[in-house]
Image (spheres, rainbow, N blue to C red):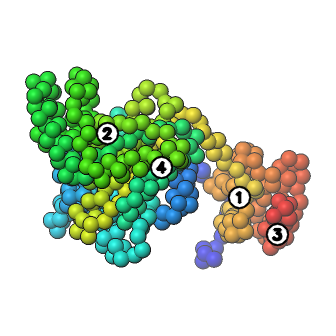
Amino acid sequence: MPILKKSPKDDAKKRPEAAAPAPAKKTAQPLSLLRGMRDLLPPDLVYLRHIQAVIAKVAQAYGFAEIETPLVEETALFARGVGKTTDIVEKEMYTWDTASGESVSLRPEGTASVTRAYIQHGMLNMPQPVKFWYTGPMFRYERPQAGRFRQFYQAGLETIGDADPIVDAQLILIAHLVAKELGIESIVRINSIGTPDARANYKNALVSYFRSKRSKLSEEDKKRLLKNPLRLLDSKEPGMQELKAEAPQMVDWLDEESRVHFTRVLEYLDEAGVPYELDPYLVRGLDYYTKTVFELFATSDDQELAQSAICGGGRFDGLVELLGGRPTPAVGLAFGLDRLMSRLKDRQALPPVVEHADVFLAQLGEMGRKRTLPIFEEFRQAGIKVGEAMSKSSIKSQMELANKLGAKWAIVIGQKEVLDGTAIIRDMDAGTQEIVDAKKLVHEIRKKLGK
Ligand code: AMP
C-alpha cells in the first residue's frame, strides 16, 4: 500500500484522460522506413504466422526439426558458401566491420548458416540425414520492386547427409503440398546443373557460344560473361530470349551420374503427382547448387506475380566440404513468405481478426481503478479473456467498448464496491445487475460462462 494518505473524496476527483504534451517549439520531421523495408502490421502478421504454422506442421510431419541461427554471421561464411561472384555477395549484402575489426554481414539466406551449424555442432557424427527447418528474416540490398524487399522472410528446409534422389523429390513434394495447403495451386520448374566438373565443361561451351555473340550482349551481360556466365541464362535483357534459344543446354552436358539422378527425381515426382516443367535456363543465383535445382510458381497468378517464384531450392552436395566439413550431400529449399503472404492477402484468404472479450472490467473512481490491476490478472490466470479500459473515467465509454468487444458480462468496481469487498456484475444484453462477493468474482463469472 502506498504511504500517501488520501481521503476517499480524492478518489472521486476527475483525472485528466492523458497528460497533454508540452507545446513543441519546432515540429520535428517525421522519420520513415528505409527503402525496401516495411512494417508488418497486425493484419500482415496474421498471414505470416499462419503461413509459418502451415510450413512448421508439414515440416515436422516429414521429420524436420526446427533450428534458429543468428541474423549476423562472419562475412566469409556467405562469401565462401553462397559464392564470391554471385550477385548476392557482390552487391546485395549488408556488411560492416565490428569495433574489433571483424567483417560481419546480415544473413542473405539460410542455407550457409544451417550448414555451418551442422558442421560446428558435430552433426556429421549423428545418424544421417539430419533434417532441419527454419524461418526468419533475410536481408539483401536489392532493387525494391513488387514482391522484392530488402528485409524479407523465408522459411527453409534442409536435408543434410543424403544423396538419394528421392530426397530431392520429397522436398519438392513438400513445397507443392505447402502451397496447396495454403490454397495455392503451383507448378515446379526444374533443371539439373550437374556436378561441378560437368558444369565447368558446360560453362566453357556457353562462354564460347556467347563470345561469338558478344556484340549483341548488353553491358551487364558482358560482365556476366566474364564473371558468372551461367547467369546469362536467366538474364532478362532485351534480345536475350533469341540468343538463349540457340545456346547450348545443360542437359546435353550432364555427366552420367547427374543424368541418372535427374531422371530418378522426375520419376518420383511423376509418382507423387507433382506437376513440373523442365526449364533448361534455370540455374539459380547461388554457387553452391549441384545437380537438381528447382523453383515453384503459382499457376493462378496474374502476369506480374507469375514471374516471381514462391519457393526455390536445390541440391548442394559441395557446401559442407566448402565450409570445412567432410564431403556430405545435401538438398534444401526456401519459401518466400512475403510472396505467399501477398497472395493470401489479395484473396483475403483468412477472416479478419475480430477483437473479442468474454467479460469487460469497468471501474469508477480512483479506488475502483486501482483494484482493476489485480482483478485483471486473476482473470487472466483463470484463462478468461477480459477487456478493459483502465485509463478511461467515463462509464459510458467503457460500456460502449464492452459492447464492441462482444462481452456478455461487465464487472463494475467503484469506491463503494472496494469498501464493501463486492463487485457488480452486469448482464450486457438484459441490462440487469447483481452484486457479488469480490472474492468469488472469478468463480461467479466462470459459472456464467460455463467454463
Ligand atoms: P533464394 O534464396 O534466392 O533461392 O530465394 C528463395 C525464395 O525467397 C524466392 O523464391 C522468393 O520467393 C524469396 N525471395 C528471394 N529474395 C527475395 C526478396 N528480395 N524479397 C522477397 N522475397 C524474396
- How far apart are the two marked residues, 2 and 1, measured between alpha carbons? 54 Å
Residue neighbourhood size for the residue with mark 4, other residues' Cα within 10 Å, grouped as few (<14), some (14–19), many (≥20)? some
**Residue wearing tag 1:** 386
List x then y, in percent, for residue 432: 89, 52
**Residue wearing tag 4:** 268
Name which residue lies at 60% across and 50% down: 17
**Residue wearing tag 3:** 443
User: Which kind of residue does numbered mark 4 sit on?
Assistant: Tyr
Name which residue lies at 31% across and 36% down: 280
Residue neighbourhood size for the residue with mark 1, other residues' Cα within 10 Å, grouped as few (<14), some (14–19), many (≥20)? many
Q: Which numbered mark, 2 or 4, is in the foreground of this view?
A: 4
Q: SS class of the residue under badge 2? A: loop
Q: In which quarter of the image is the N terminus?
A: bottom right
**Residue wearing tag 2:** 282
Is 317 on the left or on the right of 426, as rendered?
left
Q: Are marks 4 and 1 in contact (CB under 8 Å)?
A: no
